[in-house]
Image (cartoon, helix red, strand yellow):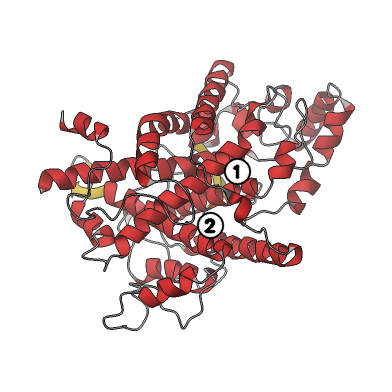
Amino acid sequence: MLRALGLLLPFLTLGGLLHSELTGVLDDCFCDVESIDVFNNFKIYPRIKKLTERDYFRYYRVNLKRPCPFWPDDGHCSIKDCHVEPCPESKIPVGIKSGNYNKYSQAANTMSDMSECEQAKELGAINSTLSNQSKEAFADWARHDDAQDHFCELDDETSPDAEYVDLLLNPERFTGYKGPSAWRVWNSIYEENCFKPRSVYRPLNPLAPSRGDDDGEGFYKWLEGLCLEKRVFYRLISGLHSSINIHLCAEYLLDEGWSRSVWGPNIQEFRQRFDPAETKGEGTRRLKNLYFLYLIELRALYKVAPYFERAFVNLYTGNTQEDGATKDLLLQIFNEIKAFPMHFDEKSMFAGHKMEAKTLKEEFRLHFKNISRIMDCVGCSKCRLWGKLQTQGLGTALKILFSEKEIKNLPEHSPSKGFQLTRQEIVALMNGFGRLSTSIHQLHNFRLLLKENR
């Protein structure tokens, strides 16, 4: 009964912790926190949860063995909960296993495991059924992928080290991975990739020398003085960090019994990361950045809807009935997103002098690409898996936002040379947004728990 009442009062204060701070309009946009809570918890979260449980979205191909490119590997986490169990190829739906040869033709995706020669022969037969326009588009696929403005360092899916992972069997949760190794990753992201000079101290950085009573206001004065694009970049990374921390607090190892482990919300851990009193007010800013990131990815989904709405684009696994239901569910989500009245307006970004805007966009892209490479330095395999997936999801969202013209010019009945998404990008995009949606839903649950405890 209390939970039902709580859903009708979606913006209860965080058990008295956040008071009235986490409320109202967000900086750099015209949307308020309360509207996002209601929209997400009632309309998006139930649907995105169902979507990410469907076969097309639950299997993610990833290389968790890539070496860290920035510092010597300090060894992988030996905690058992850090382990990722790869999925045997025999369990992968045939339509997913067949790869990305032809994303728009069911026939091209029905190949079972066969030799390269057989695949080539089969592809030749498939191509004979396609229009010249489609053949030309498919031939251009690899060249176009190489030339695209990728915001992420993408894994090579053909690498022998790349494996399919069932995301439902390897959920994101607190594994025990923490300390200097984990902080080194986030420290590198914030200190070297958020356009920040070393002389400006980020609040509550445990690896930086003590600043006494410094509450970080100097940092925020510096941040407010940045151009919108660089300020947005920092807020995206902070929002991603906050979202991941909420997942770890909500799925915490509470008890490790003989028969099974018990996972659930850890209120004390949540307080340490987000209570304004324990974070010198920083917790509220972190949570607002989560909402800001949610709006950015929501806007990307709004922009990319026409790409998926075309009849010939199938989320193909080989199971016709399931594939149709998956596409219907995805389109339902897009329809809800279109009805949301307070989208972020990205037109103000990179809108200055043409050459300066181009340079800034490239700098933005390279900084984010670097962050995606840092994910290969995460010592815990499960943390690395979810870090890579969520980073790629955000990178795909940025790619969409900066491809507006190409999406507007998509041909209705054939693939486009100007804009493409691989299956990996689609899976990362929707799962990444699903994680943000889950964070906001879990934040609501923490409000209720804190209120009950109070």
Q: Does 361 appear above or below 13?
A: below
On screen, 300 above or below 179?
above
Q: Is residue 98 left or right of residue 452?
A: right
Between 126 and 337, the one lying in front of the other is 337
* Residue 94 position (above or below residue 422): above
Q: Quadrant of the N terminus?
A: top left
Which badge, 1 or 2, comes first in the chain's sequence?
Answer: 2
SS category of the residue bearing label 2: loop
Residue underneath mark 1: 425
Instruction: Give the secondary structure at mark 1.
Output: helix
> Left of 329 or right of it: where is 243?
left
Q: Residues under labels 1 and 2: Cα distance?
A: 20 Å
Q: Residues within 10 Å of mark 2 (few under 14, many from 20)?
A: few
Residue beneath the point at 21% across and 29% down: 4
In the depicted view, which residue is nearer to us: 426 or 161?
426
Circle 1 or circle 2, nearest the eye: 1
Locate residue 446, reporting x and y percent: 24, 46
Q: How many marks?
A: 2
Residue 318 shows in this picture: yes
Going by the picture, which residue comes out furthest to the right? Answer: 132
Residue at 75% over, 66% down? 355
Q: Which mark is residue 154?
A: none
Amino acid type indicated by mark 1: Glu
Q: Is residue 326 left or right of residue 351?
A: left
Going by the numbered disc 2, the residue's amino acid type is Lys
Please tell me which residue is depicted at 52% across the width and 60% down the height of the picture.
232
Disc 1 crowd, CA 10 A, few/some/many (<14, 14-19, 20+)? many
- Asked if one can make out residue 264 in the rendered structure from this viewpoint, the answer is no
Q: Which residue is mark 2?
A: 65
Where residue 214 appears, as percent x and y from the top left, is 31, 79
